[in-house]
Image (cartoon, helix red, strand yellow):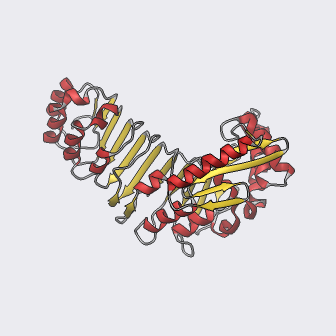
Amino acid sequence: MRLIRGDEVCEVNHEGLVVRDGPATRRFLTIAHARRAYAKAIADRLATGFVEMPDAHADLEARAVFADELLERGDAQGELIAIQLALRQAADPAHRAQLERRLRAHLITCHDELYGALAPLVRKPGRGGRTGARPAALEVTWVDGFADQIVLRHVAGSALHQTYAAMRALPIARHVTRLVLGEPGDHSYVQLINTMIAVGVPPLLRSLQLGVDARDPIHGGDLRPLIAATPGLVELDVHVASGVLGPFTSSTLRRLVIHAIDPTPVLASTAPALVDLELRAVAGCATFAEKLARSPLLARLQRLTCWRCNLEDIELSMFELHGRRFRHLESLDLRHNRFSARAIADAREELPNLVTDPPG
């Protein structure tokens, strides 16, 4: 949270086990202790005359003000915000092309300042896009001058957890809303997750993806502490073959995508906002769905997806048998499975929300 008192600006952030209050950084033994310390730090600042500043991430006018503030300090991100805000409003093709050239030149000139210790592992933009044969450890999607999405990969010379720690120390990481974590070099996310909890997740993180079409099975470790350490998490996409996903507690998570790992422990989770559950290539999907039919979680769901789960007519008949319990869903998406035309037609009598591939 950014606070202001006259000309004095202060940032107070809670990131996992870490609370940053201006220049001071404090680390706590538990997330609960860190949350209490964060709340107290905010209350203490407000009691001394600070007020909350408009959110520069959500408010375009606040972004422009923030850009001016950064420009006065000589910060490279200030110019980046100004250029991309101008691009947002530029309609003339010639003017847009001029701004895009200016943006590319600025990203090249300020490459080392923006990426710090990771600069040698990040590709610079070229005339035709990104250049360089070596894979990048970090890729940023810039939106209105902010690093909105960051993709991290394991590369030679920098393990994934080391890249994460270095990224988290960069000023641009403060405004990340989506984080995509590639395949770890040792086929396990355990060290990465421990690092994320230790140094903190980006304070505005809303979407987290663990894995991107991994070639080999990946062990996820215990994901529950990471979920607890990400208080604003809205979307979680998990590509792991083993590990502990639940039961977890999250008051904000709305969409959960599970690839391969057993989803059964999720049924005991406390996730009142969860409305979208997607299973992909999950063994025993039909057994899970039968348990889901008897779980309080189902009543809160709006969309259920089971893709590539090797479901056949007999499994579809199970959904039909429990049709009354699945009928409230906006969508029951069972595409990329193997159903006969007759089974689909019969099931649709009980499940008008059913989505399947065309028969045959």
Q: Is residue 115 visible?
A: yes
In the image, is residue 218 above or below residue 129?
Answer: below
* Quadrant (top left/top right/bottom left/bottom right) for the N terminus: top right
Q: Is residue 202 visible?
A: no
- Number of marks in the rendered image: 0
Q: Is residue 343 left or right of residue 164?
A: left
Whole-percent x, y for residue 206 in the image: 53, 45
Could you say which is closer to the camera, residue 36 or residue 149?
Answer: 36
Relative to residue 72, is residue 41 drawn left or right? left
> Which residue lies at the image location 54% right of the left edge and 70% below the top edge?
155
Which one is nearer the viewer's eye here, 171 or 50? 50
Q: Nearer the viewer, residue 206 or 152?
A: 206
Q: Quadrant of residue 129 in the image?
A: bottom right
Please report the residue visible at 14 percent of the width from the left and 32 percent of the height from the top. Answer: 321
> What residue is drawn where x is 23% and y is 45%?
288
Picture quarter with the C terminus = top left
Q: Position of residue 57 (x, y in %)?
A: 67, 41
Q: Nearer the viewer, residue 266 or 172?
A: 266
Where does the image place residue 212, in percent across and percent down from the top left?
A: 44, 57
Q: Residue furthest bottom?
A: 157
Identity of the residue drawn at 39% across and 44% down = 256
Q: Position of residue 301 (x, y in %)?
A: 34, 34
150 with respect to 189 (left or right): right
